[in-house]
Image (cartoon, grey):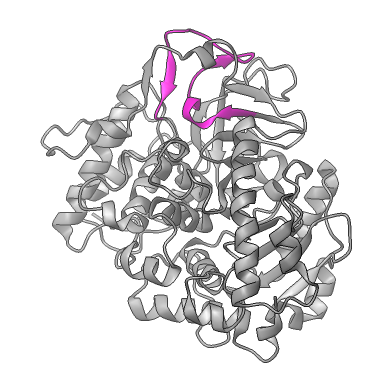
Amino acid sequence: MNHQVSLFTLYLASYSLGASVQNTSIGPNNINAYAPVVGQCTNQEVNGQSVRVAESSLSSEESSWMSKRDQVIQKNWVNYFENVAEDILGLKEHLSNDSKSSFPRVAITSSGGGTRAMLVGAGVFSSFDSHDKTAIENKSGGIFDISSYVVGLSGSSWLVSSLLVNNFPVPSQWAKESINLDTTVFAPGESDAQIVKNYEIFDAQITAKQTAGFNVSLVDLWGRGISYQILNPLASTSYGVDIRLSDFATDQDNLFYTADCPFPILLSTQLFKDESAKASGQPWEMSPFETGSFSPDVNAFVNTGSFGTTFDNLNPVDDTECTKYFDNLGFLFGTSSAAFALSDPGTDLPWEAQLILEKYMNGLEKLTLAPSPNPFYGLITNQNADAKTMYLGDGGLGSWGNIPLFPVLVPERNVDVIFAIDSSNDVNGLPSGNAIVRASNYSALVGVPFPSTPDQSYFDQNPEILQRVTFFGCNETAPTIIYIPNHVISYPTNTSTFQFAYNQTEIEGFLKNSQDMIYGQPGYEDLP
C-alpha cells in the first residue's frame, strides 16, 4: 500500500463522518474529555442571555475585563518609560497622575502561515517582552506589556493559544519548553509505535465526540495533531484534550483572569453550505468570553462556554439540551488553521495510522471545514438565520486577508495602534503586502475605518517597503498600523507553509531573525 496521502486528496477533505470504529483497547487517556456534554441549561441560557446581538458594543465581560487591563497597562506604561524609552513628550508624569485610560490602546496581530508564522510571531513577541534582557537593551521590550489585545490567525493562533495555556512565558523559554516540533502534525510521535498509539488515542477521542451526537471532520484530527506539537508539557498525559477556551475566564491561576496579559482572540472563517470562503465567509473570532463576529452579516456573539448548543432566536431549543465543552482549544485553533489539513503528510505512515487517517477522508464534501450548530439560528438580524448548521474554516481564507486585523479595527474596541506581523507566503515564502491590501479592501466594504495604505502595485514597485517596519496612518481617525513583514536578515525564515517539523537550531534562527527585524538593523533601535 502507498502510505502517502496526496495533496489533491487532502485538499478535498472534510465531511461529517458516518460509521466509525471504537477502539476500546486504549488505556485511560481522558478519551471522553474531548466529547461535548449535553445537559440542563443554565438560567443565563434559558433566559436568552447567552446569545447577544452586538449592537455596536462589547460584551459586559470583555468591558469589565478591559477596565482591569487598563489599570495594569497604566502601570506598565510607567515601567516602559523607566526601562526602555525616552519620555520626550512628558507622558510618564501624565500617566502616573491621571487615573483615566488616557494612554494609547495597543493591539498585536500575527498572520497565518503555518509553523513559519508561529515562529516569526514568537520572535517578534520576544522583542516586545519586558522580561527579555536583549529586548530591554534595544528599547522595544515592554510593548507586549502595554498591549490590550493579541490576535492570532491560523498558524499564529497556535502561538497565541500555546502562550495562553502556558501563562505567557518569555517566548525564548516557551520555544524550548512548551512546544515539540521534532515531528510533523500527521506523524505525532518519535517512533512508529508512538505514532500508531497517538492515532488510536485521537480516533477514540473524536469518536467519543461523534457518539455524543456531534458531527466530526478531518479538522478534529488535525487539531489533535497540532495539540501534540504546541501543548507539549501536557502531551505525555492528555495532549490538551480537556482544555477549553472558556476555561480561562474562570481559571484564577492564569494571567488572563487577572488581566495581566493582552486579551487573546483567535480568528477563523464562518461559512454556510455552498459558500466560498473568499467570496462569502465572515471573520469569526473566538475568545474566552465569546465567539461570533462584528461583521455586518453576523453582528452577534454567543458565550464561548455555550457554543455548540442549538439555539432558536436567542433561546435554547430545549432547556434540557444545552452543550458544554464544545470549545476544546485544540479544535478551535484547528479550525483557524484548517487549510493546512490538506497538506501531504510527507512520510510513510504506519499502516494502522494510515487506516485511521483514511477514515477521516471518505465521503468528501468540503474543503477542510468543521461543522457546528449555528448559534444564531432564528435571529432575524442575522443574514443566515435559516441555517441550522454552520462551518468554521481557516481564518486566512476570507476576503479580509491573512492578518487578523478586523477584530481590532472595529470601533467598539477603541484601538489606537495595531502591530501587524505578516508571515504570509506570497512570493518565495515571504509576504508581498497583499494581506494589507485585502484588509483595506474588506474594511472599506464593511464600513470599518482603515488607515491610508499602498495598493498592490505600490508594494510591487517598491519592494524595499517589505524589508523594514513601516507605519501606516499616523494622525488619522483610523488606528495606526505598524506593519512588520517577515524578511530575511540573519536566518532564512522563508520556509514552506507546509513544513511542520523544525529542530532547535532552526527555531533559534527564526527567533533571532524576527528579533533582528525589530532592532537588528541601523536605526531600528529608535523604533519605539
What residue lies at 62% left-to-right and 74% top-to-bottom?
Answer: 82
Q: Is residue 172 visible?
A: yes
Q: Is-magenta flag for residue 183? A: no
Left or right of residue 493, residue 457 in this image: right
Q: Is residue 210 shown above or below 340?
A: above
The picture quadrant where one finds residue 388 is top right
Tell me residue 96's x, y (percent): 69, 61
Looking at the picture, does residue 158 appear above or below residue 502? above
| Residue 53 as seen in the image, left or right of residue 479 | left
The residue lying at 34 percent from left, 76 percent from top is 504
**Residue 38, image quadrant:** top left
Indicate the position of residue 17 as horizontal and vertical percent values: 38, 30
Q: Nearer the viewer, residue 428 or 208?
A: 208
Name the quadrant of the N terminus. bottom left
On-image quarter of the C terminus = bottom right
- The percent coordinates of residue 359 (x first, y second) are 31, 39
Q: Residue furthest bottom?
A: 522
For the image shown, how many numbered marks are present on the structure? 0
Q: Residue at x 81, y 53 (%)?
A: 441
In the rendered image, residue 302 lying in the magenta stretch gets the answer yes
Q: Position of residue 224 (x, y in %)?
A: 34, 46
Q: Which residues are magenta?
A: 301-325
The answer to whether residue 22 is left or right of residue 294 is left
Against 133, residue 290 (above or below) is above
| Relative depth, front residue between 298 and 220 | 298
Q: Residue 273 sits in which quadrant?
A: top right
